[in-house]
Structures are given as C-alpha cells and as structure tokens.
Image: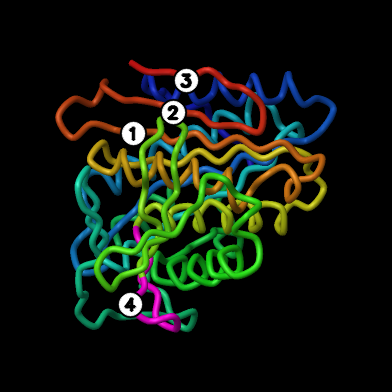
Amino acid sequence: MKLIKKNISKVESELITLIQEDVTECSPTVTAVYLEGGHFDPRYSATDFSTDSLTKALNVANNAILAHKKDIKIVLGVLIDDLGLQCGVESCEISPSPTQKSDNTGLAPLPDELETILDQYKFVKRDKLVIQGERNCKNRGIQSLRKIVSNQLTQFPQLSLKQVNEVTQVIFRNQQGTDIVLAESKDKDIWIAKCPLIMAQHYKDAYQKALKIHPQVGACHIMDFSEMDDYNKVVNGTEVAMALFLRPSILGDNKLKISNVFLSDFDAEHYSINTVASQPVKDCAA
C-alpha cells in the first residue's frame, strides 16, 4: 500500500507540526496519535462540519504516517452525538432524542457521507476505527464521578458539593476560578451528567482505547475536531479529564496531550487549537 501526500490546509499543517514535536520529544518512545473527526447527530444527515473534520483528520493521519512511519501509531475515532447535547455559557442541557437506528454495538451506524470518505483512505482499518457514543460516555462518567465523590472527594480540592434548593450539584473549579457543574442529583441514586463530565469521560475512554490498540506506546496525543460553538464544554471537559480521570497517578510514566481543534462555521481558515498536557505546552491560535 503506497500512500500519496495530501495537499493540506493551515490547521492540518499545524497539527502535523505538533506531531513532529511529539516524535522529537518522545523519541525513541513511540507515540500514539488519536485523531477524531466526523462528529455527527444520527437524527440528521451528516453536516459540512462532520465531513470536513473527518477529511482533515484523515489527511493529517495520511501525511503523518508518510513523515514518521514507525515512530507513531495512528488511531482514528468518531464520536456520535446520541444525546442531543446543547451547551452554552449559562446552561448545559441534554435534549430528549427520538428513537434512533443502532447496530449490534448499540451505536448508530455511520452516515453514508462518512462511509464514502473513509473508503477513500486505504490505510483505514475498519476493525480498528474507534466509534463512541455520548450516551455511553454519560453513563461511565457518572460511575467514575460517583466513586470519587463517595471515596476520594477530599483528595480533589477542585471539587465541592453545593446544595441549590433540593438539588445537590457536584462543582469543579477550573484554573480560571470558574465553577463548572459536572452533575446534579435530586436523589442519591439518580444523577444527571452535564456536558463537561461527558466530554471528560470521552477523553479518558479515547486514551484507554488508544493504549489497548497499541500497548507498546509510551505517549499519546488526542487531537479532537470540534465546532467553535462547543468551545466551553470541550475545553472544560479536557481540564476535568486531566484533573480527575487522567491525572499523573493514573498515567504513570506515559505522557499525554489533548489538542482541541475548533473550526469556524464561517471561515475555513479560522480555527483555534487549545492543547493541554501532562507537561506544559503552549496554546496555538489563528
């Protein structure tokens, strides 16, 4: 199988540069690069963002493989919005979703538009494609958070419990000093997850799946394409993941970076990359 170098955009080129930095920093350790695009809502046809982000993720994978060969391991992922998440500055809601088609994994099948794009990249191994649903992330996120609240709350100064009327909120104070609601409970047995918790669990799952596929790696870089409108929930989710679920005691000797790549709906050349790491990394923007 011979790959051909793709002509790429500015944001794709910047991600290639970040991968080059990973290879230089971690050599001779092999780095896993988890590239995620194609985020879609199964209630609707694939959007322009869904097809564009998947294409960009695959272009980056293609050119990174050509440039670095055995120094990296590529993992490809797609996240399904099977919850109808709506997050803004002031609110975070999960919209009721109608019944959706699912395959034998319980997840919605990929839209035909995404299948067509994947077929154009011969290095894609469909049995290694990581497809996750936000609904499953929600359930696992609640389980993870409940364990911390029940047994380890005092170990996390960022976390606190707040009573609002008859609702108990689990609060995470981020590095900017802003309180982020991770979950709410009106009953000790019924918890409602908020978007940042769901995204945090998603990144934990992505990291674990990458290491399961390539257990020999010593570093992992998650590169996740999102829309600008989702900036708050994604960035907060990344910070929660690194503070609670992917902290140094869990990572051990492994290095981890998460780069959130935000694409604009209005300008193909406008984007923002926010990188958080288990060691200091500068942010990039354009």
Residue 266 colored in magenta in the image: no
- Amino acid marked by disc 4: Lys
For the residues carrying marks 2 and 1, which lies nearer the camera in this image?
Answer: 2
Residue at 60% x, 35% y: name it.
257
Q: Position of residue 263 (x, y in %)?
A: 29, 33
Residue at 44% x, 55% y: name it.
78
Q: What whole-number distance in Å separates the C-alpha atoms at marks 2 and 3? A: 5 Å
Q: What whole-number distance in Å separates the C-alpha atoms at marks 1 and 4? A: 35 Å
Q: Are marks 2 and 3 in contact (CB under 8 Å)?
A: yes
Q: Position of residue 159 (x, y in %)?
A: 50, 51
Residue at 50% x, 32% y: name it.
60
Query: Disc 2 marks which residue?
Result: 274
Instruction: Describe the element under mark 1 as helix, strand or loop.
Output: strand
Please provide the residue range marked out in magenta: 185-194
**Is the residue 166 above or below the residue 251 in the image?**
below
Q: Are marks 2 and 1 in contact (CB under 8 Å)?
A: yes
Query: Disc 1 marks which residue?
Result: 262
Query: Disc 3 marks which residue?
Result: 283
Q: Earlier in the sequence, mark 2 or mark 4?
A: 4
**Is the residue 100 above or below the residue 257 in the image?**
below
Q: Earlier in the sequence, mark 4 or mark 3?
A: 4
